Image: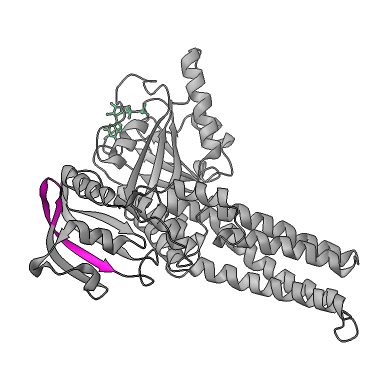
């Protein structure tokens, strides 16, 4: 079946050294020949695949740009179709004119993510790999990038395929035994299947539980900064951000609402919410801020609790820390640059906080200790993204939850001594749910929705 030849600008639409206009489809080479002139009038259609050609792009008004054209015939291309990539100068106007020349000569404008969608539809990559492409483009830190690369490399897909093969084998076994009871026996099969399904459940549970870390890898550690007014919350946040962002003042209670910022620290992302200082107050607006702070704290991965070391630990602090029990809390004993620092009684705080760091938002004391500690707490010292598999995608997580539910039903049916065809129904559901991850048995609508999140030209 003949498909449209699509084209789009694949590099960002701002002026840069080079820009790439990409085209994919049956007519890609023919269309390129209409706009591209090279020395000796040689045609791209006569050239060998996977070669680079120097020349110029022309339209009806004249020469547009001096370019390098990459010629790649399918199926050994990203989309598995014939692909031509034009490296032109990166000015927005130039790229647009090159694109327009292609569109005038028969290409159609690609929709967002359409190149990757074609790669998926042509069987070059599966859905989890396609999503990894999107994650890779959007990754905001080093660890997230490595996790996407591993997913793109097909590591998640491989494990999912293996699970599905095991499941389909059992389904086939049950079906054949029901069809041909004389030759295939189902005696003791229940016990046998229970053991195998338990093994599958362990793998699925492990993948499912990797999602918490996976989310932290991808999105960062959601951190709430708490403490009394004037403890130095905004200053700590600014120190982490390395710039003046939150409003710092000497008047207690200035951070009335929450303020969110993200920062990349040594390969990972810290998302910080600066909150209203927590203390007894009658001020209505302040009260709302304080309630919001507490509710964000309950949902956070981490709390950075700031105490002004020149004031010491107060009853307000202890009351609040008590409310937050069970959450990972790092206490920053702030303003240690001041000579009036009070003595730090670690025993008094030991029941409430995970770690205490002597800190100064002014001099930066304690910052590198804090970064090391965060790595220790959330990434086991160093994230082993390269060695372990992480589920970073919520859609995959949901599919795993469904799979686990179905597999548990299989075990229930075995335990209740239900007939074998009951097992195969739930096994089939587990098989289908796992298929969602790699894009088998995914409805067209879902495919469209996933690819529409891509950026143009990808
Ligand atoms: P918040 O109300 O908890 O957000 O506190 P701010 O960040 O607004 O800080 C209150 C005051 O303490 C400001 O005058 C800051 O300059 C000062 N401050 C904050 N951190 C430090 C620190 O580490 N050392 C010193 N000397 N002053 C600090």
Q: Position of residue 231 (x, y in %)?
A: 37, 30
- State whether residue 372 appears in this view: yes
Query: Residue drawn 45% across and 56% down?
Result: 117
Q: Position of residue 35 (x, y in %)?
A: 19, 56
Magenta-drawn stretch contains 426: no
Name of the residue lying farthest toward the bottom: 183
Magenta-drawn stretch contains 67: yes
Ligand 1 rendered quadrant: top left
Q: Is residue 236 above or below residue 54?
A: above
The magenta-colored residue range is 57-72
Q: Quadrant of residue 171?
A: bottom right
**As drawn, is 306 to the left or to the right of 389?**
left
Q: Is residue 138 above or below residue 432?
A: above
Say which of 357 and 149 sits in front.
149
Q: Is residue 184 above or below residue 455?
A: below
Q: Quadrant of residue 232?
A: top left
**As drawn, is 160 to the left or to the right of 290?**
right
- State whether residue 381 appears in this view: no
Query: Residue drawn 28% across and 45% down?
Result: 365
* Quarter placement of the C terminus: bottom left
Query: Residue drawn 59% across and 44% down?
Result: 326
């Amino acid at each position: 079946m003949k498909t449209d030849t699509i084209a789009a600008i694949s590099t960002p639409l701002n002026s840069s050294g080079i820009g790439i206009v990409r085209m994919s489809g049956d007519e890609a080479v023919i269309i390129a020949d209409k706009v591209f002139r090279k020395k000796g009038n040689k045609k791209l259609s006569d050239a060998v695949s996977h070669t680079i050609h120097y020349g110029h792009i022309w339209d009806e008004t004249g020469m547009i740009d001096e370019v390098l054209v990459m010629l790649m015939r399918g199926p050994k291309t990203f989309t598995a179709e014939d692909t031509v990539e034009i490296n032109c100068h990166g000015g927005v106007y130039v790229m647009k004119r090159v694109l327009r020349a292609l569109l005038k000569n028969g290409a159609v404008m690609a929709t967002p993510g359409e190149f990757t969608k074609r790669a998926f539809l042509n069987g070059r990559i599966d859905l989890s790999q396609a999503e990894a492409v999107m994650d890779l483009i959007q990754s905001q830190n080093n660890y997230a990038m490595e996790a996407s690369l591993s997913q793109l490399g097909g590591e998640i897909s491989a494990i999912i395929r293996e699970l599905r093969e095991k499941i389909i084998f059992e389904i086939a076994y049950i079906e054949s035994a029901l069809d041909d009871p004389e030759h295939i026996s189902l005696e003791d099969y229940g016990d046998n299947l229970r053991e195998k399904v338990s093994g599958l459940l362990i793998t699925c549970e492990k993948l499912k539980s990797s999602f918490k870390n996976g989310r932290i890898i991808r999105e960062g550690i959601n951190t709430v900064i708490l403490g009394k007014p004037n403890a130095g919350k905004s200053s700590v946040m600014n120190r982490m951000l390395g710039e003046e962002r939150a409003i710092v003042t000497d008047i207690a209670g200035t951070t009335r609402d929450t303020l969110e910022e993200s920062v990349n620290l040594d390969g990972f992302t810290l998302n910080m919410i600066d909150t209203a200082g927590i203390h007894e107050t009658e001020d209505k607006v302040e009260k709302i801020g304080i309630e919001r702070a507490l509710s964000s704290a309950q949902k956070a991965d981490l709390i950075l609790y700031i105490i002004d070391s020149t004031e010491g630990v107060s009853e307000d602090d202890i009351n609040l820390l008590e409310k937050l029990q069970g959450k990972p809390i790092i206490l920053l004993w702030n303003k240690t640059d001041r000579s009036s620092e009070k003595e730090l009684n670690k025993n008094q705080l030991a029941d409430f906080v995970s770690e205490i760091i002597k800190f100064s938002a002014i001099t930066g004391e304690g910052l590198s200790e804090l970064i090391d500690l965060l790595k220790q707490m959330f990434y086991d010292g160093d994230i082993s993204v390269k060695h372990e598999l992480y589920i970073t995608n919520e859609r995959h997580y949901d599919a795993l939850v469904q799979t686990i539910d179905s597999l548990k039903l299989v075990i229930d049916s075995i335990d209740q001594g239900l007939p074998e065809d009951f097992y195969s129904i739930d096994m089939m559901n587990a098989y289908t749910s796992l298929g969602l991850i790699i894009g088998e048995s995914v409805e067209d609508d879902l495919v469209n929705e996933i690819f529409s999140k891509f950026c143009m030209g990808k």
